Image (cartoon, grey):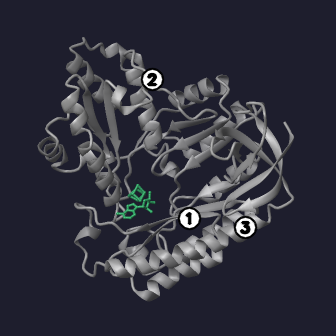
Amino acid sequence: MNVHESEKLAGILEDKGYVLSEKLEDADVVVFNTCCIRESAETHAYGNIGALKKLKKAKKSLIVAVGGCMTEQVGAKEKLKNTFPFVDIIFGANNPNEFKFLLENKLKLVHDEKDDRESFVRTSFPNAWINIVYGCNNFCSYCIVPYVKGRERSRSENAIMQEVDTVINQGYKEITLLGQNVNSYGKDTGTSFCELLEKICTTYKDSKFRLRFMSNHPKDITEELIKVIAKYPNIICPYIHFPLQSGSTDILRKMNRKYTKENYLDKIDLIRKYIPDCSISTDIIVGFPGETDFDYQETIDVVNKVKFSGAFTFVYSKRSGTVAAEMDNQISKEVKKQRITNLVALQNSITKESTKIYLGKEVEILVEGYDEKRNLYLGRDVYNRMGYFPCEEDLIGQFVTIKVDRVNGVSLFGELIRR
Ligand code: 5AD
Ligand code: SF4
């Protein structure tokens, strides 16, 4: 989502005639698009902004802008101004045009409201990101997102369909629909995520492209949605990002997740009933306040049972203003470290096992880029696995088939056999 927000900021700059500079020292404008979901993200941002002080001193004309989620926290704008007096523009996370307006002010340009359309520079051909719903209403007790991104706002179906049309006509081959909780799409506008998926799949049934979406909320994924995914195997990828957060029903309740361990496992069964080959990835937090060894083992139990194709694992990070930040029994650093280390080791062994079955198989991948270090082209299969292969010709944006002859961790290596 942040990558796509940055594409929008880049679009505003391009409209003003700026081009991307290769070297920081050459830049006339530096924009930080920050994240505050965990403390480590904020620490990074603070470090990187601070590092610009010298450059700004040497080059007075440099414009430094800081925006995104970090600035939306209570008191954050003042804190940033005080800590970094050399920053010229501080903007929020919910309207890229705010950045545009402030930049125009700084450059003393006249603002034309008619021109407040969304323009962006897509940087990830052949993958296009499309926002469908902004904000979040869920207030998971650990999470700062609802505070910095505001309430759920669905984009109109028309606007989304127009964007889908544009990217398909431009030759993009993979579309990822984005929302903090895509399953909430349309609740505020009288439509639904299932309807949107159906509409895209029927309108573009003759085009060759892949459709993905993220993230889902386990409480909201329905049998109807799973059936829609299964109904369009040539378009919708058999891949679902399905954030578990914790395997303990007790912790899930404290997290305000509104499902139990059993509900979660039942939904996994439902997904596999309709889409037996579905690849399921997840997000897990360890060290939530009050997490006992038993709670942690419940998470391990789910990981062992489900066999996720991949997991983003996080150590709980206290976010001020959230409900969990005020909870008793915050977990010590040592325990958190032990738990994350064990969890990562377990998931790695599961991922490794699941990669082995690819050996000798033919897989269709969408070529996305070139790995300069390996001297290989790379792309992903429908299950979101990365495949690498050698080739003399630039095949970025094409579907090709490789035969896998080596695997390493999550990656597949092979020879190009068809295109
Ligand atoms: N601490 C650790 N991880 C968090 N996430 C969200 N908030 C926190 C937090 N305070 C994780 C969740 C979410 C992912 C995007 O980030 O797992 O799904
Ligand atoms: Fe945060 Fe929960 Fe909303 Fe996801 S669903 S953004 S974890 S509050």
Residue 116 in the image: state x and y as whole percent.
Answer: 36, 20
Residue highlighted by disc 1: 311
Q: Quadrant of residue 302?
A: bottom right
Q: Quadrant of ligand 2?
A: bottom left
Q: Quadrant of residue 125?
A: top right
Look at label 2 and name its amino acid: Ser
Nearer the observer, 106 or 327: 106
Residue under numbered circle 3: 354
Q: Is residue 146 left or right of residue 191?
A: left
Residue placed at 51% from the left, 68% from the top?
A: 244
- Per the image, label 1 sits on a secondary structure element best described as strand
The image position of residue 346, as x and y in percent, is 59, 76
Q: What is the CA distance from the residue labelled 2 to the residue labelled 1?
A: 33 Å
Disc 3 crowd, CA 10 A, few/some/many (<14, 14-19, 20+): some
Q: Is residue 173 visible?
A: yes
The residue under label 3 is which amino acid type? Ser
Q: Is residue 404 shown above or below 121?
A: below
The Cα atoms of the two marked residues, 3 and 1, are separated by 13 Å
User: 194 and 321: which one is in front?
Assistant: 321
Q: Mark 2 vs mark 3: give the one in front.
A: 3
Q: Is residue 249 left or right of residue 239?
A: left
Residue 240 drawn at (x, y percent): 62, 56
On screen, residue 326 above or below 231: below
Q: Please indicate, yes or no, whether residue 150 appears anywhere in the rendered image.
A: no
| Circle 1 Cα neighbour tier, 10 Å, few/some/many (<14 / 14–19 / ≥20) | many
Say above or below: 62 vs 295: above
- Dot 2 or dot 1, earlier in sequence: 2
Give the residue at mark 2. 119
Q: Callout 2: 10 Å neighbours few (<14), some, many (20+)?
A: some
Which residue lies most toward the bottom here? 294
- Give the residue type that dot 1 points to: Ala
